[in-house]
Image: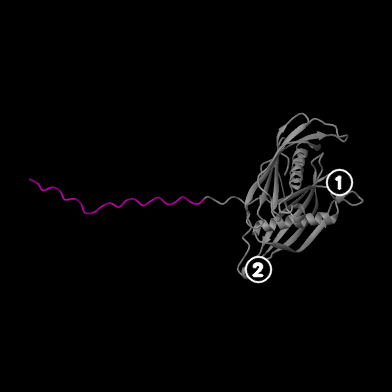
Amino acid sequence: RLAPRARSLHHTPPPPPPPPPPPPPPPPPPPPTTLIDIVFPGATNHHGTLFGGAGLSAMDRVAFVAATRQGRVPFVTASCERVEFKKPAHVGEIVSFVATPIWAGRRSLTVEVEMLAEAISTGERHLCTRGVFHMVASLDPPLRETWSLPPLATTHDVPPSGEVRMADVVFSDQTNSSGAMFGGDAIAFMTKAAFVAASRLCRKLAVLASSERLDFHHPIGVGSIVEAVARVVSVGRASMAVEVELWAEGLLSGERCRTAKGLFVMVAVDEYQRPVPVIPDEFGTGAS
């Protein structure tokens, strides 16, 4: 008889575990920060055009928001230069202030801001002024020696066509005794975004007919960045339903949460305030 074969003393090692999946890519940075307003008579001079000081104030404000989004630390304005007023913005026009960081040092950031005026009836846009704002991080001494700005992004998130995004900062005169933004100020900000979205669609004056529903989910604290996102969701004969979301963003943390959502019905009117048909030439393609 043959002896049974001895078992091998060598064992095949198990295969190595698969490598962990790579981490997901970070989300693209937000697009250039945009502050949008309408030129009302109270902000104009005797020529019926926007005060230069009011325009400069809005440019500095949006530069602050853009700088804070880049560094997430307190910033102050060190200087501004090359501010040249080329054309005025007239009563009734939409004005957009677009801030883009263009250079980053260790603690200083250069932000270019453009102010654009837009005629509601034609959609024609022209550059009113452009300026460069130098922002400096305001840090305590221990952090001042070690902290540095992150590099500037090379790509940006592109908002959907037809969507209006407008950002601003909540100041203390807009808050109640508990430090939260007044509901009325929040509604006014959302209504302004709805007006811009509706006017860009129909290229006529748009007035607020009703607010079908408005829900507040979270308070907005003083010093927060607030951003309204508006889009036209349906069109009737003379009316447009505009959905508006209101987002709060922590100034230093960058955390975002949706604080309110509403549906606004806007009606297109002529110069006599009579309803007129909505004829969108390019539905949903209004510039933001």
Query: Range of the magenta residues?
Result: 1-23
Can you tell which quarter of the image residue 131 is in? bottom right
Instruction: Tell which residue pokes out farthest to the right in this image.
Output: 46
Residue under pointer 2: 140
Q: Position of residue 81 (x, y in %)?
A: 78, 62
Disc 1 secondary structure class: loop
Residue under pointer 1: 91
Question: Does the magenta run of residues contain 5?
Answer: yes
How far apart, in angstroms, are the residues tagged by discs 1 and 2? 44 Å
Q: Position of residue 256 (x, y in %)?
A: 63, 50
Residue type indicated by callout 2: Asp
Instruction: Tell which residue pokes out farthest to the top in this image.
Output: 237
Q: Position of residue 109 (x, y in %)?
A: 69, 62
Q: Quadrant of the C terminus?
A: top right
User: 236 or 258, which lies in front?
Assistant: 258
Q: Is residue 181 left or right of residue 270?
A: left
Of pointers 1 and 2, the one earlier in the residue sequence: 1
Residue type indicated by callout 1: Val
Callout 1–callout 2 Cβ contact below 8 Å: no
Rendered image: mark on residue 162: none
User: 207 or 196, which lies in front?
Assistant: 207
Disc 2 secondary structure class: loop
Q: Residue at x 66, y 52 (%)?
A: 249
Q: Quadrant of the N terminus?
A: top left
User: 151 or 137, which lies in front?
Assistant: 137
Can you tell which quarter of the image residue 76 is in? bottom right
**Label 1: how many Cα within 10 Å (few below 14, some 14–19, many 20+):** some
Q: Against 84, is 245 above or below?
A: above
Does residue 60 appear in the picture of this structure?
yes
